[in-house]
Image (cartoon, rainbow, N blue to C red):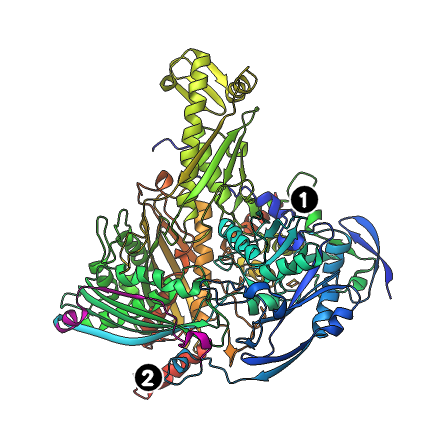
């Protein structure tokens, strides 16, 4: 049986009819066409599907869409301000933190969520916050550098 | 080359804004109208007879459009390096990744459900999972028709006289090393959409690393399926990681074509993560017997290696990795006498393919670990034995490699200084340092008849440039590097350069994103095309300005007289004059660069690459004697890259390759237990996370490579080549145990420490 739910995604309200077993990742991608949320494993192991749900980063492949009913969701499409990249995105670009880019949306959302709560994270805290986001291309070094740099610009 | 504007700068990747905003379209995100979803059923057993397949229930499921089995593959079609692999199996399955049936349905969920309804009766057969068993007299045949489990491949290289050199050596060290199965773990899984028009011309949306060769493979397949003289167009989506995994065509692609032919609708197959672990082709495990010798002064006298590779059940490019293994075996350090032989052996395991480094990491693990053993026997510092024998510019190696630029000694020195080697080595107090060097192809590799890449440049009416290249962007940044090269030649901003690189209908031929060749080959190709278009532009501008072309320069889209800057014309204007004149013409240039390297002759001699990449890695570790845990305290990765065209992207290759190598050394292993993959998830397969990533210093050593575009050499693969032996050597320096079997897990270290306490070596 499908259920009508309301999702507040990137500050816009969507009403969707969803089956109870649909994950938030599926609904975002397939019903709302927000394809920036990536699915790297669909098992909660890689973080590619990270979105921010009520101020907390979650693996959207592990959240049922119905659980997100009437809650606030930020996906990668909602991070930039129109044509202006968010400081975290900008830092990822400028510091070479992106190669194939498949991990990037999830990585950026994890980083953004961290910096919103902790504007001056230590390197340890950065690594802890990103530990659920796998990246095979970069060796993570430039990702960590980018998050550090973003924390600097965001403070200003 | 003093006055470079764009080359050598830390320029962000051109596609990075697209990727940071989630706008990049990967195969996962692609849809075409009317598309169906395909799924593949894999074998339940590693070795079995297929007695009966009943697909009737699956076919009856609403929403299922096509169900295929091996019986539906036309004309006994097989693919792969020696065409031993049918896309859907009949009669017998040879591994648990064997495709036995496939479904196309209107949704992925229905397709999945349909797989559960396919009934297959198997008769299980005993399997062979160990290449040593498979080589034994009387062993059951994996492919009965081949009459041997050892592939008929001529992997043998001999130089000088190893037996005589052994007798003349002052010291000899001999041992056996082994490596494990590891897999690419691209974050974006494999996938494709096969779409056929009414005349059976194929459009394949793909994430291949070899668009031109894949196009050819699919053409061949269509021919066997009964469709001659068709057109195949390969369109690459944004690629979520390659690392060699997409250097071949696979069963799923042929299955998608067959499903689409039958359904008369486009069919998309995208792997789940479980599929990706099970059904992409990993780096094979190897067993290497090695001995090396030196004279009393530490000069290497010989190197002898016998290697056995688990080929798995079918043959892909993995079986050709011994050709690249020969690069370090024949030419890492100066070694006059060489004997090498490799055997690839069929088993009922998954089958192997290309993976970053292409055999070099397995060979270098044995060579560099054993070199430390030799140094110890000879009483020489591991650092000194490497310095004494280091390669040098101008050398011709036993395989006839002509060494042009070579920064090996400089790389070793960087490692030594940055690690504080002199003070830290030889303490055996739980902390230790180790190093290992590398050689790899750095100026392409002539594996195919052509090693070329084409570029077409066209300039539009507004003075913007389109660069149409055969090369593929797989995350490494080729699009950006090519833009930089063209921008430098034309004196333009890279923002005015648009690279088109993903459509075989438009793009010229290229052999593929492999062998660390893209910067070198596609770069040289783009350079040649840019120079040709510049000549044309200057000639036209000269006519308009009443000057000779030599008197002109071009900068920021303006062409001006060097003497009198007032005399100038914008590029856009030149273009419009050319286009809008009666009898006008286009401004287009093309250039095909095929490097002057050589295919191997039948004795495996020949200058495989125009240039060779060198490097040295050094590592300081701390070993916990209670737990066997190895902690990396400091990691130096020094690489001779020719000229660094974009140091930021280059470091990205070193960091990424380095961490992949650290994973290879310390944790990653596909556990194949009697043909079944036991750890096919990210949870169980220990790919490094950000918390596992130690501090790495990427050190760029620049040598000017005359044949490279602006002096550059390749760097895609070298980052992970010497990692494992550098770490193994450091562990030995720290606690005196040598782990000869990758990965170096705490259990192995602990067991070795216990043995050592008991007094066993
Ligand atoms: S896709 Fe959700 S964690 Fe991997
Ligand atoms: S950039 Fe490719 S997985 Fe992170």
**Where, quadrant-wise, is the N terminus of chain B in this rendering?**
top left
Q: Position of residue B675 (x, y in %)?
A: 52, 78
Q: Residue furthest bottom?
A: B758
Q: Is residue A124 left or right of residue B537?
A: right
Residue that badge 1 annotates = A80
Tag on residue B756? Answer: 2
Q: Position of residue B486 (x, y in %)?
A: 45, 34
- Name the residue rendered at 78%, 54% in the picture: A31
Label 1 secondary element:
loop
In this view, the residue in front, B456 or B167, is B456
Q: Is residue B359 visible?
A: no
> Where B132 sits versus A13, above or below?
below
| Region of the chain picked out in magenta, as a range | B141-167
- Name the residue rendered at 26%, 47% in the picture: B404
- Name the residue rendered at 35%, 85% in the picture: B755
Query: Marks 1 and 2: same chain?
Result: no
Residue B193 image-quadrant placement: bottom right
Q: Position of residue B290 (x, y in %)?
A: 28, 72
| Magenta run includes residue B145 | yes
Q: Ligand 1 shows up in which quadrant of the image?
A: bottom right
Is disc 1 in contact with disc 2, using a CB cutoff of under 8 Å? no
Question: Label 1, label 2: how many angstroms apart (C-alpha)?
Answer: 58 Å
In this view, the residue in front, B592 or B714, is B592
């Amino acid at each position: 049986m499908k259920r009508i739910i309301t999702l507040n995604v990137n500050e816009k309200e969507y009403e969707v009819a969803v089956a109870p077993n649909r994950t938030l990742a599926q609904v975002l991608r397939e019903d709302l066409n927000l394809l920036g949320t990536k699915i790297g494993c669909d098992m909660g192991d890689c973080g590619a599907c990270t979105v921010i749900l009520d101020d907390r980063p979650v693996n959207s492949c592990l959240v049922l869409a119905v659980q997100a009913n009437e809650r606030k969701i930020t996906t990668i499409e909602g991070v930039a301000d129109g044509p202006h990249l968010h400081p975290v995105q900008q830092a990822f670009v400028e510091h070479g933190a992106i190669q194939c880019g498949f991990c990037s949306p999830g990585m950026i959302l994890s980083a953004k969520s961290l910096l919103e709560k902790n504007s001056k994270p230590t390197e340890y805290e950065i690594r802890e916050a990103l530990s659920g986001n796998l990246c095979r291309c970069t060796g993570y070094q430039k990702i960590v550098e980018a998050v550090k740099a973003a924390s600097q610009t965001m403070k200003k | 080359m003093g006055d470079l504007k764009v080359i050598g700068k830390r320029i962000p990747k051109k596609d990075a804004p697209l990727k940071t905003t989630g706008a990049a379209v990967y195969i996962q995100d692609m849809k075409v109208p009317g598309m169906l979803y395909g799924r593949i059923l894999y074998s339940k057993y590693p070795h079995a007879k297929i007695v009966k397949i009943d697909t009737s229930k699956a076919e009856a499921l609403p929403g299922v459009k096509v169900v295929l089995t091996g019986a539906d593959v036309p004309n006994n079609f097989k693919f792969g390096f020696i065409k031993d692999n049918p896309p859907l199996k009949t009669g017998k399955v040879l591994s648990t990744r064997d495709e036995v049936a496939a479904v196309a349905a209107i949704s992925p969920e229905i397709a999945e459900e349909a797989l559960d309804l396919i009934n297959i009766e198997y008769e299980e057969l005993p399997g062979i999972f160990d290449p040593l068993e498979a080589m034994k007299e009387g062993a059951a045949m994996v492919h009965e028709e081949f009459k041997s489990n050892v592939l008929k491949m001529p992997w043998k290289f001999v130089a000088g006289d190893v037996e005589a050199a052994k007798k003349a050596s002052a010291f000899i060290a001999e041992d056996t090393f082994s490596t494990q199965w590891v897999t690419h773990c691209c974050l974006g899984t494999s996938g494709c959409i096969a779409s056929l028009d009414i005349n059976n011309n194929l459009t394949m949306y793909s994430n291949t690393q070899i668009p031109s060769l894949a196009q050819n493979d699919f053409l061949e397949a269509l021919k066997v399926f009964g469709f001659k003289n068709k057109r195949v167009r390969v369109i690459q989506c944004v690629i979520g990681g390659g690392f060699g995994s997409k250097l071949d065509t696979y069963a799923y692609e042929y299955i998608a074509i067959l499903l689409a032919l039958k359904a008369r609708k486009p069919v998309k197959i995208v792997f789940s993560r479980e599929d990706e672990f099970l059904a992409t082709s990993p780096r094979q495990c190897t067993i290497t017997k090695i001995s090396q010798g030196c004279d009393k002064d530490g000069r290497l006298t010989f190197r002898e290696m016998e290697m056995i590779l688990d080929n798995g059940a079918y043959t892909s490019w993995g079986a050709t990795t011994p050709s690249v293994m020969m690069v370090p075996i024949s030419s890492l350090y100066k070694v006059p006498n060489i004997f090498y032989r490799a055997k690839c052996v069929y088993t009922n395991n998954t089958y192997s393919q290309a993976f970053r480094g292409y055999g070099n990491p397995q060979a270098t693990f044995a060579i560099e670990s054993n070199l430390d053993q030799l140094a110890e026997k000879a009483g020489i510092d591991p650092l000194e034995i490497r310095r004494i024998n280091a390669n040098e510019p101008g050398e011709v190696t036993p395989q006839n490699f002509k060494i042009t630029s070579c920064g090996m000694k400089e790389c070793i020195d960087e490692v030594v200084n940055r690690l504080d080697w002199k003070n830290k080595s030889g303490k055996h107090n739980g902390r230790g340092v180790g190093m290992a060097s590398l050689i790899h192809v750095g100026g392409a590799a002539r594996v195919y008849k052509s090693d070329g890449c084409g570029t077409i440049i066209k300039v539009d009416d507004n003075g913007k440039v389109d660069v149409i290249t055969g090369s593929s962007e797989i995350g490494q940044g080729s699009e950006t590097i090519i833009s930089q090269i063209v921008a430098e030649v034309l004196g333009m901003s890279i923002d005015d350069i648009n690279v088109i690189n993903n459509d075989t209908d438009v793009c010229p031929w290229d052999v593929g994103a492999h062998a660390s060749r893209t910067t070198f080959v596609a770069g040289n190709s783009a350079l040649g095309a840019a120079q040709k278009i510049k000549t044309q532009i200057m000639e036209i501008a000269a006519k308009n300005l009443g000057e000779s072309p030599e008197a002109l320069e071009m900068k920021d889209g303006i062409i001006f007289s060097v003497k009198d800057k007032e005399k100038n014309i914008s590029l856009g204007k030149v273009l419009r004059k050319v286009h809008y004149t009666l009898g006008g013409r286009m401004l287009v240039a093309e250039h095909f660069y095929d490097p002057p390297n050589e295919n191997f002759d039948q004795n495996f001699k020949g200058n495989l690459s125009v240039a060779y990449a060198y490097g040295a890695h050094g590592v300081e570790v701390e070993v916990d004697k209670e737990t066997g845990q190895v902690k990396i305290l400091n990691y130096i990765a020094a690489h001779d890259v020719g000229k660094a065209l974009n140091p930021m992207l280059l470091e990205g290759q070193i960091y990424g390759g380095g961490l992949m190598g650290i994973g290879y050394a310390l944790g990653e292993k596909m556990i194949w237990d009697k043909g079944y993959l036991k750890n096919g998830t990210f949870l169980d397969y220990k790919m490094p996370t950000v918390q596992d990533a130690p501090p790495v210093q990427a050190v760029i050593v620049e040598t000017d490579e005359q044949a490279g575009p602006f002096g550059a050499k390749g760097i895609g693969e070298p980052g992970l080549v010497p990692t494992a032996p550098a770490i193994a050597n450091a562990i030995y320096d720290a606690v005196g145990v040598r782990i000869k079997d990758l990965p170096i897990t705490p259990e192995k270290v602990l067991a070795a420490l216990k043995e050592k306490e008991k007094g066993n070596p």
